[in-house]
Image (tube, grey):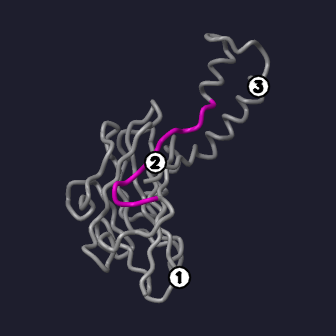
Amino acid sequence: MSLRAVGLRPAAASALALLAVGGCSGSGTPGSKDAAATAVRQPSSLYISSSALADGQAMPAEYTCDGAGRSPPLTWSDAPAQTQSFALVVEDPDAPEGTFGHWGVYDIPASVHEIAAGAGNSDGLKQTSNDFDRPGYGSPCPPKGDKPHHYRFRLMALDVAQLSSAPPEVKDLNAAIEDHVIGTAELTVTYQRR
């Protein structure tokens, strides 16, 4: 099981860079302006993991079209203090016709830190339609004989409790959360059908 933090959105990164340039003078003692700037500049420490998936490794067939096709269990920790909700996007950037959306989940309460195995195949979550034109988790099913495809499980901490409207598809979820992401964590696995 591997954990990986990805960081902040570009606008936040630019603001932090300005803080770094502007906050280089002074003693940096606790309670000083410089100490506060140092605290603000810390990158997101959000982490995502799975008891069934290992970062950089092959996805077990159970979670693909060659198995039960159920969604894998996921857990996360260390969200930014300002987190109001989470969103999850699972995509395959290696699909023949461009990035393929396999799963979109949104309005996950900030108090929640896991998604159980199979939850993406039920009605218990707020989910978009995947690019198979079905709601919920669309299990990986790359063309037989293709090189291994990469499946990115991206968890985003958001600064809003709920999105203003329900995004119908994964691509719409990406657009809806773009200005609200305050932390991102990613777990990437591969799958190949022979």
- N-terminal of the pair, mark 3 or mark 1, is 3
The residue that disc 2 covers is 156
Mark in front: 2 vs 1: 1
The residue that disc 3 covers is 22
- N-terminal of the pair, mark 2 or mark 1, is 1
On screen, residue 110 versus residue 48, left or right, reads: left
- N-terminal of the pair, mark 3 or mark 2, is 3
Name which residue lies at 43% across and 68% down. 101
Q: Distance of mark 3 from mark 1, alpha carbons? A: 48 Å
Note whether 71 is above or below 162 in the view shown: below
- On residue 110, which mark appears? none
Q: Is residue 34 magenta?
A: no
SS class, disc 1 = loop
Note whether 95 is above or below 107 in the view shown: below
Image quarter where the N terminus lies is bottom left
Magenta region: 41-54
Q: Amino acid at mark 2?
A: Met
The residue that disc 1 covers is 147
17 vs 165, nearest the viewer: 17
Q: Amino acid at mark 1?
A: Lys
Image quarter where the C terminus lies is bottom left
Residue 136: quadrant of the picture: bottom left
Please report contact status of discs 3 and 1: CB closer than 8 Å, yes or no: no
